[in-house]
Image: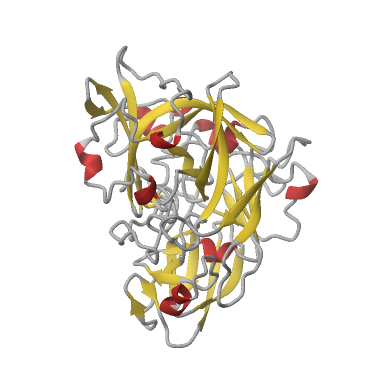
Amino acid sequence: MTTRALLSTIALCALLQACGGGGGGSNGGSAAPAAQASAPVAASAPASASAAAPASAPSPSASAPDADTTVPQSTTPNVQTIEVTRTSTNTRNMLRTSVTICVPGTGTCQTIDDIQVDTGSHGLRVLASALDPSIALPLVAGSGTNAVVAECAVFGSGYTWGTVRAADVHMAGHVASSTSVQLIADSAAPNTAQDCTESGLPMLSASSLRGNGILGVGPFTADCGAGCAASAMPRWYYSCISGNCVASTLAVARQVTNPVANFAADNNGVLIELPNVPDGGASSVTGTMTFGIGSQSNNLLGSAIVLKSSSTTGYVTTAFGGSQYGSSFIDSGSNGVFFPSTTLARCGAWYCPSTPQTIAATILSSSGAQSAVSFTVAQSTALFGTGNFAFDNLAGPASGYFDWGLPFFYGRRVFTALSGRPTPAGAGPYYAF
């Protein structure tokens, strides 16, 4: 779903927070370009849950030396089931999972389905309407005695608004204790800040969000970082008193946090594995999200090529068609591959060449490593006509950036390493596949 372009378009907090999380509008997620922010919310519309890149490096701890390759070993169950299936909104290429949320330190819990998995944003965001009233999550303390902390999260497809609350987040055998999450459309913060409402379409319901929430497992620990701790920035955090919300600072430790970063082990990144799909797509696909990199026998890098990304934006560079796109990211929250092309025919928000076209590009790392990638772009109208929901050849136009959305993940083992956390290949952030 492209959240604030958190990662999908990973833009610095200083820029527009988000554009579309993950490269695709409501089906993706990241903080990069907001290209899909105005895309129609339709079955065939681009979707991105990615949000905007952190306004700055998440925290001083994120600057661990790249040479740090000592990874604590773990035996905790670390495999989470993920899937692409039919959605209530008929949105294609929506990678989803289930997450269990508990009142901190208690056994009062609820498992929430239809949570989009987004490597282009950071932190868990759940609709208040999806939670049972018995799950009374405590509000995260703000600067004022009676202030309610709220957040505007901007994605390529629109924005979410809600309070920041603490929860124990359970996935596989892990628990992220007392982790800050966003509760979308929470009645405790009923009035959306004016500047937030100017950030695209509101994603405050299951139909507009295309699910019950977004799980941001991008390369940073917090969704904004040190910038929001030092300065009150528009379209990030707010202090609300009696319904009046003003931009405010928020300590990094209280910001909406990537739950993986708060696991006791297997906390340096994620590995997403999805099977190949046929040219005409598949009705459903089941895969795995494995927590940790090099911490267990099931998350070893093996022969994967490691592509270091920017320590401030999470971007890599894509060389394509004689140009280099420095705003490039690998984003499971975008439901297509989005890139500029002057030759591919368009049908609305998608490319629709009369015959499938093979595209060649190279992803370049800040460290000098690179990987050549070829992929196919098929006629979008023909793909949608199959009635399938998983496609590895669905693509659409973008301007000035390259969003490697969910089609890139099919048939690959794709790692996203957390900034500053040691891995066998050195500290993140990086992608590897």
Q: Is residue 405 above or below residue 64?
A: below
Q: Nearer the viewer, residue 226 or 44?
A: 44
Which image quarter: residue 156? bottom left
Q: Nearer the viewer, residue 43 or 199?
A: 43
Which residue corresponds to the image point at 34% horizontal and 31% vertical from the top-left? 186
Q: Pick out the residue farthest to the top.
A: 145
Q: Position of residue 358 (x, y in %)?
A: 53, 82
Which residue corresponds to the image point at 32% horizontal and 12% vertical from the top-left? 145
Which residue corresponds to the image point at 37% horizontal and 64% vertical from the top-left? 45
Q: Nearer the viewer, residue 81 or 387?
A: 387
Q: Position of residue 365 (x, y in %)?
A: 56, 59
Report the number of numbered marks: 0
Q: Position of residue 400 (x, y in %)?
A: 36, 66
Left or right side of 131 for 397: left
Q: How is the image coloured?
A: secondary structure
Q: In the rendered view of the protein, which quadrant contains the C terminus?
A: bottom right
Q: Is residue 277 above or below residue 382?
A: above
**Residue 322 visible somewhere in the drawing:** no
Which residue corresponds to the image point at 58% horizontal and 39% vertical from the top-left? 420
Left or right side of 171 for 142: left
Q: Nearer the viewer, residue 214 or 358?
A: 214
Q: Position of residue 235 (x, y in %)?
A: 29, 39
Which image quarter: residue 111? top right
**Residue 245 visible somewhere in the drawing:** yes
Left or right side of 303 for 117: left
